[in-house]
Amino acid sequence: MALMEVNNLEVYYGVIRALKGISFQVNEGEIVSLIGANGAGKTTMMQSVVGIIPKRSGTVIFDGQDITKTPCHKIVKLGMTQVPEGRRIFQELSVYENLLMGAYSVKDQQRFKEDLEAAFERFPRLAERRKQIAGTLSGGEQQMLAMSRALMTRPKLLMLDEPSMGLAPILVDQIFEIIKELNAAGTTILLVEQNASKALEISDRAYVLETGSVTLSGTGKELANSPEVQKAYLGG
Amino acid sequence: MEVIVSTLINGLSLGGIYAMIALGYTMVYGIAKMLNFAHGDIIMVGGYTIFVAMAVNNPLLAVLAAIIVCVILGVVIEKVAYRPLRGASPLAVLITAIGVSYLLQSLAQIIFGSAPKMVTVYEFGSVEFLGATMQVSSLVTLGVTVVVMTVLTLFVKCTRLGRAMIAVSEDRDAAQLMGINVNGIITITFAIGSSLAALAGLFYLLKAPNVSFTMGAMPGIKAFTAAVIGGIGSIPGAMLGGILLGIVESISYKIAAIAPYTDAIEFSILILILLVKPTGFLGKKRREKV
C-alpha cells in the first residue's frame, strides 16, 4: 500500500523549472532511494514535498490524506519527518534541547522519556554529550543528533537527505546500518543520496532523478545492475 | 558629589527607558530577523492610549489598556505589513517598516493634532539619596526593566516556547520540520516586543509627561543604537546598551560645552563600537549558512 504518493510535482525557482512534473511513490515498509547528480533536484523535491518550498502544481498524498497544501509544521504531526541536507541541527542549543525540539509536537511526557532513552541507547555518544552545545559536535555526532531528533516524533515515514554527506567511510557504514535497523523496526524510509552504490544496496526500490525529471526506476538491484546507472553513478 | 549622584541617577532612569525599548528591538530582531523601525511609534501609540484612558483616572487600567492596544497593533502590523514580505530582501522589509512608522505618526497627528498633550499618569514623589533628589519613578523604571530582562532571559532559555524561539531564530526551515509554527512564533515575538513598547511609553510619560505624535521617534532610534551597542539579538546586551547610553546622555547634558552635541556623541559611540567590535558588546558572531 502506498504510504506516500507524489504526482506530477512541479517546482519553479523564479522562471527556472527545477522539477518538471515528477511522480513516485513510497510503499509502507519500504526503503526507497532517489539518486541523482548534484543539481538534479533531489533536495528541491524533499523540501517541496514537506512544504518548505512552494509547489507550482502536482499533488502529494500521505497516508491517504492530500497534503499538497498543508503547511510544513502540520505535516510533521501526521507522521512524516525529514532529516534535512546538511543536518541543520540547532547549533546554539544543547544535545538534549535539540531532542526536545524534535519532540515539539509530542505532548506526552512519558513517551518523550521513552524516545529519549531509545535515542541515547541507539547513539551512546549522544548520551555522553547530552548537555553539550550541539554546534561543538563532530560531523558524525551531528548526523546522529539530526536523525535522533527526527525520530522523536515516531514518524511513519522518515525522509533522509544526504545522510552520508561529509562523513568518514566508517560512519557512513554505521549510518546505513541504522537506516536498515529503523526500517526493520517498521519505519518507512525515503532516502536521497549521492552515494548511489550504498543507497541502492539497501533499497527495495529506487528512482533516478536527472535535471528535474525521473528518468529511471526499478528495484535497488535492477538499478544497481543497469548499465546506464553504473556508467553515470557507480563509476562503472 | 551631589551633581554626580543626580547625573548618574538620571542616566540610569533614562537608560532604563532605552533598555526597555531596546529589549523590544532585540527580541524582534533576534527571532524574526528584521529591524522593526516602527517600534518607536508603538511607544507613541502606547502614550496616546494612556492619555485617552486616563480619562477614567485609573493609572493601572490605563497601562493595561496601553499594553493591550500595543500588542494588538504589533501583531496586526506584523500580519499585514511584514508577513507578506517573508523571504523578500531585508531592504524591502526595512523600507516597509519605515513606511509603517510614518503611517502611525501621520495617523496620530490626524487624530490628536500636532500639539503635545499633557498627561500625568501618577505622582510617585521623590526621595533624598546621598544629598541628591531622586524621583521614585526612576527607581520604578529601572526596577521593572531589570525584572523584565530577567524574566525574558529565563523565558527564552528555559521554556518550551522560548526554545522554539531560539530554534526559529537559528533555522526557520529546520524549526518547521520539528513541527514548530514559525509564523505563530513570530506573532508571539511581536506581541512581546509591543507590550514592552507599551511599558516604555509609560516610563517615558513618568519622566516627561507629554505625548506627541513624534515622541517615539528619537527614543526609538536611541534605543536601536543601544541594542546594537549591546549586541543586537542579545537580551542582556540590550539592557547593557540602554543603561550605557542613558548614562552617557545624562553626563553629556550636564557638561555645558558638549551638551548641544549630545546626540552626535551618542551616535559616534555607536560608530566607534561597530568599528572595534562589530557584534556589539554581548552579540554573538553567527556563521551565515549557505
Image (cartoon, rainbow, N blue to C red):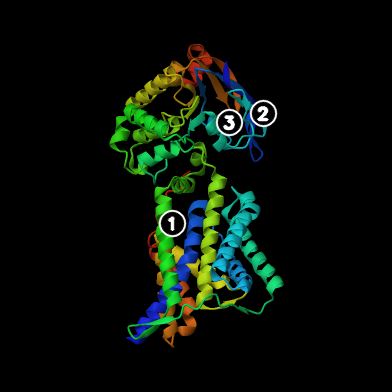
Chain bearing mark 3: A
Sequence-wise first label, 2 or 3: 3
| Image mark for residue A49 | 3
Residues indicated by labels 2 and 1 sit on the same polypeptide chain: no
In the rendered image, is residue B168 in sight? yes
Q: Nearer the viewer, residue A226 or A214?
A: A214
Residue A16 position (above or below residue A59): below
Residue at screen point 61% across, 53% down:
B82
Helix or strand or loop: what does disc 3 sit on? helix
Circle count: 3
Disc 3 to disc 1, how far (Cα)? 36 Å
Q: Amino acid at mark 2?
A: Gly
Q: Nearer the viewer, residue B237 or A173?
A: B237
Q: In the rendered image, which quarter is residue A236 located in?
A: top left
Helix or strand or loop: what does disc 2 sit on? strand
Q: Which residue is mark 1?
A: B152
Q: Are marks 2 and 3 in contact (CB under 8 Å)?
A: no
Chain bearing mark 2: A
Residues indicated by labels 2 and 3 sit on the same polypeptide chain: yes
**Circle nearer the viewer, 3 or 1:** 1
Q: Nearer the viewer, residue B284 or A113?
A: A113
Q: In the rendered image, which quarter is residue B67 located in?
A: bottom right
Residue neighbourhood size for the residue with mark 1, other residues' Cα within 10 Å, grouped as few (<14), some (14–19), many (≥20): some
**Circle nearer the viewer, 2 or 1:** 1
Chain bearing mark 1: B
Helix or strand or loop: what does disc 1 sit on? helix
Residue at the bottom extreme, as displayed: B256
| Image mark for residue A58 | 2
Residue at the right extreme, as displayed: B110
